[in-house]
Image (spheres, grey):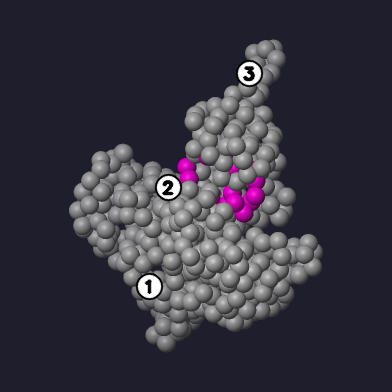
Amino acid sequence: MILADDEKAMLDGAGGIARQRAMELLVRYAEALGAERFVDTKNIAGVPGSSTVFLQKYFEEHAGDGSFEAVFSLYDLDAGEVMSIPSAAGGNCCHLQGGMDLAHGADLGMSPEAMQHQRDDEAELARHGVRIMKTCTPYLAGNLPLKGEHCAWMESSAVVYCNSVIGARTNTEGRESTSAAMLTGKIPDWGFHRDEYRRATHLIEVETPVEGVMDWGMLGYFIGYAVEENIPVLTGSIRQADPLRHKHFGAAAASSGGVEMYHIVGVTPESATLEIALGGRKPVAAIKYGSAERRRVYETLNANGRDANVVYVMLGCPHASIDQFREVARLLDGRRIKTHLWMFTSRAVKTVADMSGFTQKIENAGGLVMTDTCSAIARAVPKGTKVVALDSAKQTHYLPAMVGVEAWFGTTEDCIHAALTGRWAGELL
Amino acid sequence: MILLHGRGIVGGCAEGEALVTRQTISGWGGIDPMTGTVIEMRHELRGQSFKDKVLVFPGAKGSSGWSNAFHMTRLTKSAPLAMVFNQMTTKIALGAVVTRVPAVTELDRDPLDVIETGDWVKVDGDRGVVEVIKRCEPAWRANLK
């Protein structure tokens, strides 16, 4: 690797031992990738030092220390000793989603021990200069990078949004690399940091109208299976490309596959024309999405749903935007639900939803609004839940396997109808 | 014995029985890090564990929690013995590094064409070499299939 002077200095220990270990980990990672250098980054989104009770106990048992700094040293930095961890190197370092909403820990089935642990972690993070954003949608909560900005982000749905919709540059980083970047301000110059890597490889011809959020999610889910970790460019009848639709589309494509960037001709920032999106090359494959493919995706997402008696409706994957709050509040206004309904969002968006009266309407109907987490991350559903209704292809992909429930997938309206009646009645129109 | 040459991305040497899939693997939400079992719905390895096996697969997909999920398998002693894969991504590079098991990629033949589940595979991450001994079975048993 070609190392800059400041990188060599950190490797030699000039910035202290924690930065030295962080650089060592980044070098191991960069060499595995085959990267030749690092880029500077001041925009980091990760889960630094956060630990489950399992991790805390593991290090208490094996290293005699389960503190924040021990977990950060031994796990995040994969180092052999517990070190004093300096504050974030500067700029914008935020914490993504976490394991629970402390205001609803009991609803989520969290032990008092786990809740106290979360409080302690949060205080440590704040002390280390990390912004407590606690969301999978940092771009809706105050971390909106510039086009071309080099970032080091985790959270596959945020990564694909960052690259595709914003035009900033990040690979799908992991916990260890983002924590190391937090201390060093460095990340391997590989993949999506480089122009040539960002060009589309697969052409997707959309031949059936895609307008609503559910349809954007289904198209994303289809594309993830079709292209896996490649880069699609979409042409055809895709409409209403608002941030909400991009959020659901990208999250789905990053779940069924490993899509980290996509192009939509005439819509996304590096895709003014098909030729530009493809970088002048021919696509390696052209894939059609028509009404038959659309129906197959719908059936796949609903393959696990059998019992129409819905117990739990979960909304907010990825974390709900303020537009989704307005929609759900409108659908629930003045009515009472028969199921459990949990809606997840960031603390920032919840604050706006509270002040706009949306939270009150949802709570008056019998729902709960929670922050920080979701059912898949927290592995928490209301007690006795066997059947859930979801409006997110991503959550439908993960939740049944993770907590052992049946899932129905449909529109937000289908989900609210299920909440009001206790029955799933969604169908593909 | 079949020899494959590639690039080692994590050093060390390990050998054992192969577990092979042609489907990419999700980390977070796709495996149970306490047991090394694949849990993804509709995955061809669903219900099978890679613990103490040489995992041969196309690559990583899904959540950015990939490295964390595989890192956890190291702590729970459920990690694969080694990794052999085709498609380089940040998820798998970081995941292999922190799982600290020998890992080799960029092989001169597609390991998915050469290696089958049950073959005996030796992975040398320092030299970037994968040795494969095909499983054999008596003819009478093969004839029963």
The image quarter containing residue B115 is: top right
A36 lies above or below A8:
above
Residue at x 60%, y 37% (from the top left corner): B127
Q: In this view, does A17 lie above or below A189?
A: below
Residue behind mark 1: A144
What residue is at 65 percent from the left and 46 percent from the top?
A: B101
Please state the extent of the stretch shown in magenta in the rendering: B87-105
Tell me if mark 3 has few (under 14), some (14-19) or many (20+) residues whose alpha carbon lies within 10 angstroms of its own: few
Residue B52 lies left or right of residue A301; in this view the side is right
The one nearer the camera, A326 or A229, is A229
Residue A77, given in percent of the width and then of the height, sits at: 62, 63
Type of amino acid under label 1? Leu
The residue closer to the viewer here, A157 or A244, is: A157
Residue A304 horizontal side relative to residue A229, left or right: right
Check if mark 2 and mark 1 are on a common chain: yes
Tell which tag, 3 or 2, sits nearer the viewer. 2
Query: What SS does tag 3 mark?
Result: loop
Q: Which residue in the structure is indicated by mark 2?
A: A229
Q: Left or right: B129 with respect to A193? A: right
Say if mark 3 contacts mark 2, CB within 8 Å: no
**Mark in front: 1 vs 3:** 1
Q: Which chain carries label 3?
A: B
Have a look at marks 1 and 3 and say if they share a chain. no
Q: Which of marks 2 and 1 is nearer the N terminus?
A: 1
**What chain does badge 1 belong to?**
A
Q: Which residue is drawn at 22% across and 52% down?
A: A276
Residue A111 lies in what quarter of the image? bottom right
Instruction: Give the amino acid at mark 3.
Output: Lys
Alpha carbon distance from label 1 to label 3: 59 Å
- Residue picked out by circle 3: B145
- The Cα–Cα distance between marks 3 and 2, rounded to whole angstroms, is 36 Å
